[in-house]
Amino acid sequence: MSQLIPVRKIYDVCIIGSGAGGGTAAKVLTEGGLNVVMLEAGPVLNPEKDFKEHIWPYELPHRGAGVGGGLRYQIGDEFMAPNGFWEIEGEPYTTAPGSTFRWFRSRIEGGRTNHWGRIALRFGPADFKARSTDGMGDDWPITYDELAPYYDKVESFIGVFGSKENVPNSPDGVFLPPPKARCTETIIKKACDQLKITCIPSRLAILTQPLNGRAACHYCAQCGRGCMTASNFSSSQVMIPVAQATGRFTLIANAMAREIVLGKSGRVEAVSYIDKTIRSENRVYAKAVVVAASACESARLLLNSRSTSFSNGLANSSGVVGRYLTDSVGNDLAGYFPQLEKMPAHNHDGVGGMHLYMPWWRFGRKNDFLRGYHIEFGGGRDMPGVGSFGGVCARNEGYGVSLKQKCRSSYGTVIGFSGRGEMIPNEKSFCELDPNVVDQWGIPVLRFHWEWGENELKMADDMHETFRSIIEAGGGTVLSNPFPVQRPRISEGGAIIHELGTVRMGNDPKSSALNKYCQAHDVRNLFVADAAPFVTNADKNPTLTIMALSWRTSEYLIDQARKGEI
């Protein structure tokens, strides 16, 4: 009697990664009628168990001071949303001699959207035409007008607060009402008005009104810890539940993707992954694959997916996979504002982020550097950050009553500024496979090469001088070293956590890996839906653009599937 061979389940689409791009793809594809399986390298998120939204410092093992797992200059990492790591035991990465690069990774359902500051900025028309504007870098194969309808769709669904301002190259969107400015923000707003620096309501993916069954923000100002009411956006709480509700979605957690398998037809047919719970290798089969593991992780997966057809990595006949790696240019400064000592103690209600910000206000002018930056700032009496009580304790020395008096008087008097600017891609900043190092699953790891260009260094210096002028115009005094560790002239590569551009899109298959729909030139049923397809960095945080691109790519994939092309 012959043995029955089990029927192999073949999904319409396999998505690798559950963050901004992967979650958006899951929502759109399943609502479009496709059966989707998603591989997530971490566990399923349980907000009630995993989020520490309203926990007090004395309830934590180290009183909220952390043990080095969080941001290098930020205390309080025990408070943060779970499974965001600078270093993961058993999953190393390396840097080339002379390079410094830090890689933040998330291993949990929803990915980095659990750790995102929710700053939701549209790229502007000029950002898609950088080379046409100033002759550096490359233009995108799409325009702002082509992506604008998808920005509309994302904002309308997830909820973004803001205001219509008509700022050049910082497009307005579909906005919920912004929250009112707090006292620290009104001080800075007056200083910016005096200096003719544009200062407007922020644009954050946090609800100020109920939307799609989600409650409005209750203004606990602890968004970085997660949000049990899902009032701030995360893929795990906003996108993935929609996909699950269709009945056409399967999530495989603790699944570390190792290789995308190419079939005899020249199309991808499966994804090989490690089940981390039992350390075994499995395969999931699909008619199409959407890679959304984060820019560098996606590049790593493609480079590790070698075959006789693609000896340098899947969909890499152009050789650009891993190249054109960028991160946002960053610099920071903080000021002490004595008038805040006289401010009566009060609750600094609001969202866990800035209520105002400064978009790039010198657009179109002649500057000492190309492109531009926006400014984020914050202060007041909160638990995390340089203006927090922990930050006060880190800056003051002493003992007993005198120390307590110093801490009380200076608590809430510091306002910190951070710049986020555009990096122009250069040939010395890229990632590749390390020929000698593998992770605990036997998968070759990434090796990073990094170097800032002169343009970025000039931009960082300009940030510093701008922050100084705002502090002084607001009646403050610059603090030369408000952080536990002195910050450098410019942020380290990777430190801003906006790495992108490693699997770029373009019209020419010889100089790009993906077409204008983020579909691989070399492999018709392979797509990339995170920040890897980006051609330029822009001075805006990339997450909103990741979701808009993913939505557009997913609609195209659905159309191709209906036509029988995939």
Image: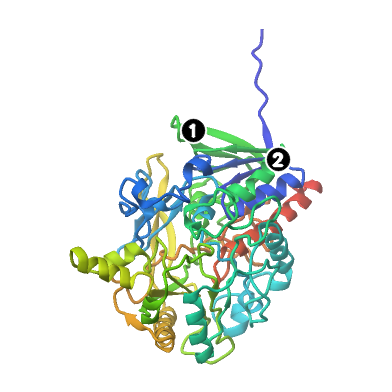
Residue 262 seen by the camera: no
Of 513 and 168, the residue lying toward us: 168
Residue underneath mark 1? 281
The percent position of residue 375, horizontal first and vertical second, equals: 49, 76
Q: Count how many numbered circles sit on residues in the image.
A: 2
Q: Is residue 238 above or below residue 254?
A: below
Q: Is residue 480 above or below residue 386?
A: below
The percent position of residue 469, horizontal first and vertical second, equals: 42, 88
| Residue 48, disc | none
Closer mark to the observer between disc 1 and disc 2? 2
| Residue 245, disc | 2
Which secondary structure lies at badge 1? strand
Q: Residue furthest left?
A: 399
Residue 328 seen by the camera: yes
Mark 1: which amino acid? Glu
The percent position of residue 494, horizontal first and vertical second, equals: 42, 63
Q: For the N terminus, give its image quadrant.
A: top right
Crowding near the residue tagged with mark 2, few <14, some 14–19, many ≥20 C-alpha atoms within 10 Å: few
The disc, 1 or 2, on the residue closer to the chain's N-terminal end is 2
Mark 2: which amino acid? Ala
